Amino acid sequence: MTDLTNAPVLVVGAGIMGAGIAQVAAQAGHPVWLHDTREGAAASAKAALAKTLQGLVDKGKLAADAAEAALACITPISALAEAAAARVVVEAIVENLEVKRGLFRDLEALLADDAILATNTSSISVTAIANGLRRPGRLVGMHFFNPVPLMKLVEVVSGLHTEPPVAEAIFTLSKAWGKVPVHAKSSPGFIVNRIARPYYAETLALLQEQAATPGVLDACLRGAAFRMGPCELMDLIGHDTNFAVTNSVYGAYFQDKRFGPSGVQRDLVDAGWLGRKNGRGFYTYP
Ligand code: NAD
């Protein structure tokens, strides 16, 4: 099995998830290259992380030298070629099969044959992403949860091509990063999103029927001992991503009504109200 202790890591996508994954890898001592096609995004993610880590230092939750060391591990890069020595890639870009496939084809041409290609997809078939690669057995799902530094679970998702030692290496790496990994098969939505989709669908149906407001729904579920209500959770996920995940799972279950998308989601995306990440979703954020 590939030993990934202190291995150089490439994180592609410096959005909500990629920034969190880079943080976790850096805090575990890995050199991390962070890349995003949006100009300046990787550098902004590093600057935001500097603030977050300083906040933890100020609260006495992190030693100043640990914060400094983690930050020094992260190098924003503008061209993937700068990370040719990466032994493991974690992809956290847009939830779109063709875009992910294109990226992995480029990465495969760039990286060593034994590099591990991990995708943080929430819902797209790992088998389908791997199809067409020269070494499809090197691709595996590494599905983190949001916010990455706080959420312990990682679904290690094997597609039909995934070589068992590759899944095992990512399982071990997740543990080394302080996570609690589980093995999952590449079925639509894997485990958590399979269960969560109907939960969001019922929430969105209540909103569509104007049977309850987001505030009431969130208060109800918080009152029922959920850490967050469903509307604030969808705002945290991002409605563009969540809508893409809904459509992906719906399609993969052959339009099973249980997993159907909602006009409420489409309206939010059409309006550009994507949630916390751009200041407005069901709620507004400073
Ligand atoms: P996001 O919109 O916050 O960030 C995605 C980033 O990828 C953007 O900065 C974008 O510029 C960049 N990008 C797009 N195409 C690219 C490319 N070809 N190369 C490099 N960068 C590219 O999205 P996110 O919420 O971080 O989601 C990323 C992935 O993680 C998706 O597959 C999503 O399904 C998955 N995921 C999201 C959550 C969540 O709660 N948001 C949870 C688990 C998994």
Image: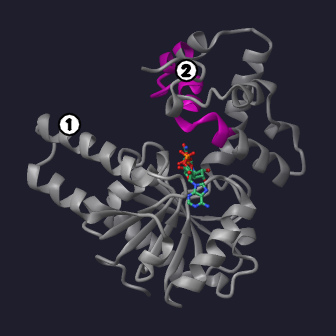
Instruction: Reply above or below: 170 against 272.
Output: below
Q: Main secondary structure of the magenta part?
A: helix
- Number of residues whose C-alpha sits closer than 10 Å to that of mark 1, classed few (under 14), some (14–19) or many (20 or more): some
Colouring scheme, one of rainbow, by chain, secondary structure, one colour: one colour
- The residue sitting at 63% across, 53% down in the picture is 94
Instruction: Reply above or below: 104 against 152.
Output: below
- Numbered circle sitting on residue 117: none
Give the residue pinned by disc 1.
55
- The residue sitting at 84% across, 50% down in the picture is 251
Task: Return the x and y of residue 22 as percentages of the image width and height.
Answer: 38, 58
Q: Amino acid at mark 2?
A: Leu
Q: Quadrant of residue 121?
A: bottom right
Task: Return the x and y of residue 197 as percentages of the image width and height.
Answer: 70, 39
* Mark toward the viewer: 1 or 2: 1
Determine whether the residue tagged by mark 2 lies in a helix, strand or loop: helix
> Would you say the beta carbon of the disc 2 residue lies within 8 angstroms of ligand 1?
no
- On the picture, is 194 further left or further right than 275? right
* Mark nearer the N terminus (1 vs 2): 1
Q: Given the current orientation, which residue lies at the most extreme bottom position?
A: 113
Instruction: Reply above or below: 171 against 178.
Output: below
Answer whether residue 160 is magenta in the image: no
Give the residue pinned by disc 2.
221
- On the picture, is 200 further left or further right than 140? right
For the N terminus, which image quadrant? Answer: bottom left
- The residue sitting at 29% across, 62% down in the picture is 26
Answer whether residue 231 is magenta in the image: yes
Task: Return the x and y of residue 127 as percentages of the image width and height.
Answer: 72, 71
Q: Which residues are magenta?
A: 219-242
Q: Amino acid at mark 1?
A: Gly
Q: Quadrant of residue 101?
A: bottom right
Residue 122 showing in the rendered view:
yes
